[in-house]
Image: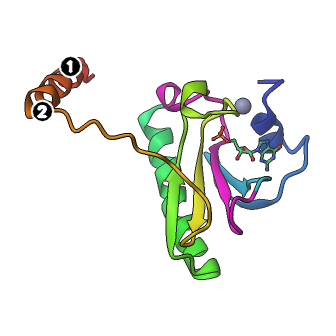
Amino acid sequence: MSDCVFCKIVAGTIPSTRVYEDEATLVFMDIGQVNPGHVLVALKAHAENLYAIDDAQAAALARTCRRVAQALRDAFSPEGLSVYQANGRAAGQTVFHYHVHLLPRHAGDGMELTWPVKNPPREALEAYAGRIRERLR
Ligand code: 5GP
Ligand code: ZN
């Protein structure tokens, strides 16, 4: 897509700091660097979000995430690693080209994700699960 910033990074028409690439994926440094070593694992092909990718692309992305996560662990010795991926504006997505954040974490690093748990009764869990199961393709 001509107006997509990550397509431009894949094509090399705008600068980025590349870490790794293979046939299907590209890893580059996130310009914001929430913590040192914060990278983005993107598909080379344009796909807006998780709904738009196929099984082969999902597998390629997961494989690259696993490899690069191990290198991040060895390079930065973080206390933890957050794997973050947003779909849609309401989920916090700002670049609409499928990508996963690998974010090295340290205690007290200020990164926050609030989980406003509802702890519904078991019947609600069963009903929610049923709605999903019926629609699995
Ligand atoms: P998300 O869509 O998951 O919220 O995050 C998009 C991420 O892309 C942000 O963390 C932001 O810092 C990063 N980003 C946005 N524009 C650029 C860019 O031009 N180059 C790089 N390297 N990262 C970018
Ligand atoms: Zn794109």
Q: Amino acid at mark 1?
A: Arg
Q: What residue is disc 1 on?
A: 131
Give the image quarter of residue 97.
Answer: top right
Foreground residue among 47 and 82: 82
Foreground residue among 125 and 70: 125
Residue shown at 59%/57% (left/top)?
Answer: 111
- Residue 91 spot, x, y in % from top left: 54, 32
Foreground residue among 132 and 23: 132
* Badge 2 element: loop
Is residue 133 visible from the viewing direction of this image? yes
Q: Specify the label residue 121 is tagged with.
A: 2
Q: Specify the label residue 98 is tagged with.
A: none
Give the image quarter of residue 136.
Answer: top left
Foreground residue among 20 and 109: 109
Q: Amino acid at mark 2?
A: Pro
Q: Which residues are magenta?
A: 33-53
Q: CB under 8 Å between callouts 1 and 2?
A: no
Residue 45 within the segment the image draws in magenta: yes
Residue shown at 55%/37% (left/top)?
Answer: 86
Local crowd at mark 1 within 10 Å, few (<14), some, or many (≥20)? few
Quadrant where the C terminus sits is top left
